[in-house]
Image (tube, grey):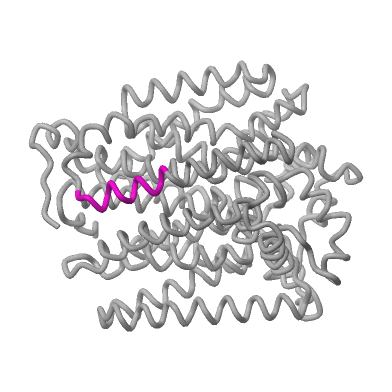
Amino acid sequence: MAFSIPRSTQETLFSGRPQSLMRAVLFMALAIVALIPHFLLTAGLGAVGLIWLVLLTGGALLVSYEFAFALLIVNFFLQNAFIATAIPLIEDPDHFRLMLGSNVVSVFLTSTIGIPIWMRVRRGLPPEVNALMRWLTYFCIVIVAYTALGFAAASSASAITYMRIYFVGFLMLVIGIAFGFRMDLRYVLNIVRVLAGILIVWGVIEFFFPYDLYRVFRAVDFLNYKLIGFIDVINISSIAEYIRYETNSYLNLSGSLGLDIDLLRPRGPNFHSISYAYALVFCCLIGYIYRFRVVMWGCLPLIFLVGAKGPLIMNMATLFLAWSYGRTRNTRRLITMLATAIGIYAVVGILYGIYTQDYHVTGFLGGIRGFLKNPLGHGVGVGGNMSAAGEQETLTDFQYYQNYGADYGFESALGVMLYQLGIGSIVFFIFYGRFWKSIWRLVTAPQTDPRLIVIPIVLAFLVANGIFQEEAFSPAGWVPWLMFSGFLLAQHWRTAKLPIVVK
């Protein structure tokens, strides 16, 4: 559909110029330095420390969108490394919890960029864009309503935890669209390259020198603070004990078909192996799309080393399907292959989980049972791994759930969503379907680079991963892809054609 944006708007918003890699390195370094005072102040003073983050983010948005973007990426992907270094200043455990929400605060503050930009350009955009945003608004209303229900049925902390998970994804989509109207694509790609370099270097050091890395970043103290209020019977006292605690079976295969290969999976700067795997997959596939071979081949071995099934399967299936599509440009064949791959993945995964009593599938089936028991939904924050009640119930009654089944959702993004939102989940699937269709149309246009087909493939696989992992819909899973998709959509809307792929 043809449409245009007024020239005055273009001159105001689209005046970006090609950015060098060194510019991205500089802004990422400045962002790291600028965020250190925030975590130090918050560790010692609590909420007062957030004033620095508010002023820093607001100032960045006024002075330089490039710096604001770098600030957001650093805080989002490296937050826990900052927290770990600030742990000696913590006097109140509540300060630790407050710091864990720093990246969410950063997302909410940065999302304000979208308001003035959206008001300027919305009249020049095609009707399908406004329809997409309407459904996004409807889903936000559903989340607010079910959060109110969650406040009544569960703790306020649990309701807020899950509310921010839902909101962060959609706010990052809005941020991606806003920055897409304002920044050069090459700058964003260079930021991804710098981020990939940090993740790769961290993974190599963690694999070869775990004791030294965990000592410098106080991994033991970080884990103990994280476990406060959830697993009070466990206290890790040494790095050796920490390594034993975090050593798991490769691919995390459980039950009678579990592997006897135990290893310490790299956990990355956020000290969470699944989050680290999803971040590596994002960088790896962006490297594939834009032919950043060092990034791609640097991330790929670490993805295998972490051994998180969902991200690993998604990464390899996406590479194969994208390669196949690049040879034929046959969209019907790709749709068939994609649907078949996801169907086989889901069916085999569920059957395997039922046979081995895998806790991911146990949680997914529990979410379905809870949904059938109460289709209206139980409220945001009720059930799920990240709720206080859900964590305690999973730990104390898990063997019972394995033998007889659960009646609430956990360890499964879809299971938790169905349990919490009930029929309200329909709004999410309508929005996500429209969003996916917009991306699909964009990347399958004849003039686009076929490697961009990676994006709708990943967005589809994330839903399948949502069956088996609660992290699939967490900030680590879908958020980077929502943000980057929003960026490409904005680039397309502003020029009526997809940006040329950077070679």
Q: Is residue 265 above or below residue 31?
A: below
Is the residue 63 above or below the residue 444 in the image?
above
Q: Quadrant of the N terminus?
A: bottom left
- Overall secondary structure of the magenta section: helix
| Front-lying residue, 92 or 457 | 457
| Residue displayed at 32% across by 37% down | 23
Taking the image as shown, residue 362 lies to the left or right of residue 487, namely: right
Image quadrant containing the C terminus: bottom left
Relative side of 116 to 146, left or right:
left
Q: In the image, 317: left or right of 64?
A: right
- The reply, left or right, for residue 368 in relation to residue 64 is right
**Magenta segment includes 68:** no
Q: Quadrant of residue 39?
A: top right
**Magenta run includes residue 135:** yes
- Residue visible at 81% across and 56% down in the picture: 394
What is the residue that sits farthest to the left in this orientation? Answer: 7
Give the residue displayed 64% in from the left and 61% down from the top: 415
Residue 393 % position (x, y): 83, 52
- Residue 46: image quadrant is top right
Q: Residue at x 11, y 54 (%)?
A: 2
Q: Which range of residues does the magenta coloring cover? A: 126-137
Q: What percent of the width, then of the height, locates residue 133? A: 34, 46
The x and y percentages for residue 113 are 35, 31
- Looking at the picture, how far across and down is residue 395, in whole percent? 84, 55
The answer to whether residue 204 is seen in the rendering is: no
How many marks the image carries: the answer is 0
Residue sitting nearer the eye, 388 or 481: 388
